[in-house]
Image: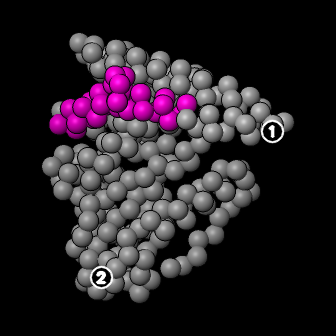
Amino acid sequence: MSTISFSYTTCAHSSLLYAVDHQFFKNRMEEGDDNLLYLYKSADAKSPLEKKKEACDSTDSPTFTSLKCHPFGNGGQCDADEVDDHVNMDVLLTHAAIEAVTTTYSGFLDGQNMFIADYAMGTCPDVYKADKKREVYAWDLDYCFKHHRIDRSIYGCDRTSGKQTKQQEFVFSNQGFLDTYNDKMKRLVATGTGEIIHKAKDYLGQLEHTLKPCLEKDVNSNGALESFETLKKYLVHRSKVITKELDSPDPLCSIKMTE
C-alpha cells in the first residue's frame, strides 16, 4: 500500500481530521488475497486514492468503469436498476437518513466529504469482476447537530444554491429509493419508548451521569454539561420537524418551493 501524503497548509484541523478518517476506513477494509480494494475520496475522483494491490495496473474499479453516468459520472442519466446492481443502496440510504437527521453536511446526498469503497475479485490483470457492491462513507463528521439547520428538509438543499444536489435529485426522483429512504427515516425519528430517539436520549443521560464528576472539576469544560440537555432537546425538536415533513401531502414540496 502506498503512503498517502496530506497537506496541512489550508486548514490544519480539517486536514488532520481527514487523515484520521482516511486511516480509519483503510483499517476497516476487508482483507483477502483475492480481493482488490479501490478507495476513492469523492464521487468525481479520476483515479483511486488507494489500491490494496499495487501490482494491479487497472486505473479504476469495475464499478467506477461501469457507472460513468449521472450522478456518479459525467455521462447520461443512470438507470436505477443498474445502480442497484453496483451500489449497496440499502446501506447508502441508511447512512443518508442518519446524516439528514443529524444535519450533517457530509455524505453521498450532499455530494461531498465521502470515501467510496469499490471492490474487485481475481488476480491481475484479470480484476474486472465486481466482488462486492460499492460502499459510501461520510468523513469530516465534526459538523453536525447544528441548531441553525435544525429545520432543514430531509430531502436536502444545497447550502449555496438553495437547490438539491445531483445526488439528491437522482435518489428522490426514484420512487423505490424514496420509499426506502422514507421508511428508514420514520424508524429513525420515532419517539416511543424503545425507539431510536428514546434510546439516544437515554444513552446521553447515562453518559452525562458518568462524565459529570470529571466535567465539574475541569475548568476547561466550557459548558459541556449543558450540551447534553441541549442535544437531547435537539433530537426531540428534529424528530418533530421530520415527522411533520414525512406526514405532509407532498413531502418534497419544501424543495420545490425553493427552486
Residue at position x 28%, y 38% from top? 171
Q: Is residue 254 left or right of residue 62?
A: right
Mark 1: amino acid: Asp
Label placed on residue 34: 2
Residue at position x 23%, y 58% from top? 86
Pick the residue in front: 239 or 165: 239
Q: Main secondary structure of the magenta part?
A: helix
* Dot in front, 1 or 2: 1
Q: Secondary structure at mark 2?
A: loop
- Find out whether the residues at labels 1 and 2 contact each other: C-beta distance under 8 Å: no
Residue matched to label 1 = 218
Q: Residue 228: which quarter of the image?
A: top right
Q: Along the polypeptide, which appears first: circle 1 or circle 2?
A: 2
Pick the residue in front: 26 or 252: 26
Residue 207 appears at what percent x and percent y?
Answer: 58, 38
Q: Residue 209: which quarter of the image?
A: top right
Residue 195 appears at what percent x and percent y?
Answer: 34, 30
Residue 13 appears at what percent x and percent y?
Answer: 70, 50
Range shown magenta: 176-205
Residue at position x 28%, y 39% from top? 170
What is the crowding at mark 2: few (fewer than 14 residues within 10 Å), some, or many (at least 20)? Answer: few
Q: Is residue 181 above or below residue 67?
A: above
Instruction: Assess whether residue 13 is covered by the magenta stretch.
Output: no
Instruction: Assess whether residue 195 is covered by the magenta stretch.
Output: yes
Q: Is residue 86 left or right of residue 201?
A: left
Pick the residue in front: 127 or 237: 237
What is the crowding at mark 1: few (fewer than 14 residues within 10 Å), some, or many (at least 20)? Answer: few
Mark 2: amino acid: Asp
Using the numbered discs, state the Cα–Cα distance from disc 1 to disc 2 in whole angstroms: 51 Å
Residue at position x 61%, y 61% from top? 19
